[in-house]
Image (cartoon, rainbow, N blue to C red):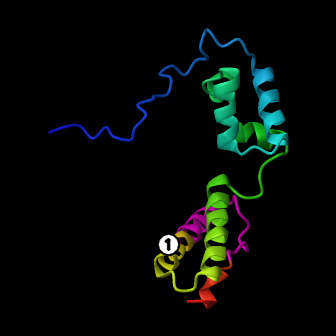
Amino acid sequence: MPKQEKGRSHSIRPVSRRPPSWCRYQSEEVEAFVVKLAKEGHSLSRIGTLLRDQYAIPLVKPITGKSISDILEDAGMTPSMPEDLANLVKKARGLAVHIDKNHKDVHNKRAMQVIEARVHKLSRYYKRKGVLPKKWKYVSKVASIT
């Protein structure tokens, strides 16, 4: 049987948990880069990608001993909503605008229900972990349309 390799980049994370010998940045410099990129408005995942591509920093944690979110928490710059939940809410808003214009699009109404179910499930998790306040609630705008 052939392998299921289609669509994978085959990139792997560094094996060692120590900072690479070829990385020329110190812990304070990497933390300064993270804070600077966060002030520019980049998300956590985008910050990691920019550090990898522009500054040749493969992973932040082996160099600094802290993750990107921990660095931003120490700097008092934590986002109000976790990135994965924010992306789902943004996708739901865009789909709500589409459904407002196209009332008969039943396929995207179903997609909206699936996205909102994921939002509710993820919000329950973050409420349980204490990341979101207990009273936080996602209000569906499209529920009245269906």
Residue 98, given in percent of the width and then of the height, sits at: 62, 74
Query: Which residue lies at the image location 63% right of the left edge and 90% below the top edge?
Result: 144
Q: Residue 6: name its quadrant.
A: top left
Q: Quadrant of the N terminus?
A: top left
Which residue extends farthest top?
A: 21
Placement of 85 over or under 11, stated as above or below? below
* Of 44 and 92, the residue lying toward us: 92
User: Is residue 48 something one can see in this rendering?
Assistant: yes
State yes or no: residue 1 in magenta: no
Tell me the kind of residue under disc 1. Answer: Ala
Query: Which residue lies at the image location 73% right of the left edge and 74% below the top edge?
Result: 135
Residue 20, given in percent of the width and then of the height, sits at: 59, 14
The residue beneath circle 1 is 111
Residue 19, given in percent of the width and then of the height, sits at: 61, 17
State yes or no: residue 126 in magenta: yes
User: What residue range appears in magenta?
Assistant: 117-138
Q: How many marks?
A: 1
Query: Which residue lies at the image location 61% right of the left edge and 62% below the top edge?
Result: 88
Placement of 125 over or under 96, stated as above or below? above
Image check: 135 left or right of 91?
right
Which residue extends farthest left?
A: 1
Residue 136, given in percent of the width and then of the height, sits at: 72, 72
Query: Which residue lies at the image location 53% right of the left edge and 67% below the top edge?
Result: 118
